[in-house]
Image: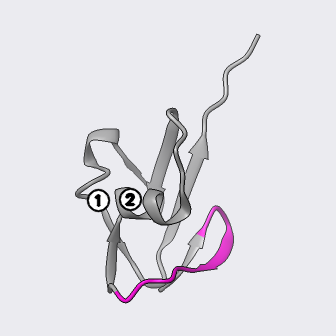
């Protein structure tokens, strides 16, 4: 599957036609707590990570929120 992940072309090693955000996190080993996710510019809520799907050609943004002082 080919997607644009954080403004970079990315090929995901999967035979599936669609993936959930949770599956993407597993594939990419993303384990950060504070993430903001968008699929094609649409914000995905944290409780929707299991049910929000993207497909070949979609744009996915995963932004790690960092706070500091």
Q: Is residue 55 left or right of residue 65?
A: left
The numbered mark, 1 or 2, whose residue comes first in the sequence reads 2
Does 12 lie within the magenta span? yes
Kindly check if marks 1 and 2 are in contact, taking CB atoms under 8 A apart as contact.
Answer: yes
Q: Is residue 27 left or right of residue 22?
A: right
**Percent of width and height locating residue 45:** 33, 42
Instruction: Give the labeled residue for mark 2.
Output: 21
**Percent of width and height locating residue 17:** 32, 86
Instruction: State whether residue 55 is above or below residue 28.
Output: below
Instruction: State whether residue 55 is above or below residue 45.
Output: below
Q: Which mark is residue 52?
A: 1
Residue 66: quadrant of the picture: top right
Q: Which residue occupies 37% across, 89% down?
A: 15
Q: Quadrant of the C terminus?
A: top right
Crowding near pointer 1: few (<14 within 10 Å), some, many (20+)? some
Q: Which residue occupies 55% across, 39% down?
A: 32
Q: Residue furthest left?
A: 51
Q: Which mark is residue 28?
A: none
**Percent of width and height locating residue 54:** 37, 71
| Part of the protein shown in magenta | 5-15
Q: Residue furthest top?
A: 69
- SS at circle 2: helix
Q: Is residue 23 left or right of residue 33?
A: left
Q: Nearer the viewer, mark 1 or mark 2?
A: 2
Q: Residue furthest right?
A: 69
Separation of residues labelled 1 and 2 (CA atoms): 6 Å
From where the camera sits, is residue 2 visible?
yes
Q: Which residue occupies 50% across, 83% down?
A: 13
């Amino acid at each position: 599957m080919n997607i644009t992940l954080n403004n970079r072309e990315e090929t995901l090693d999967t035979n599936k036609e669609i993936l959930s955000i949770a599956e993407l996190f597993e594939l990419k080993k993303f384990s950060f707590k504070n993430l903001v996710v968008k699929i094609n510019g649409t914000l995905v809520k944290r409780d929707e990570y299991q049910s929000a799907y993207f497909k070949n050609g979609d744009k996915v943004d995963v932004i790690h929120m960092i706070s500091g002082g």
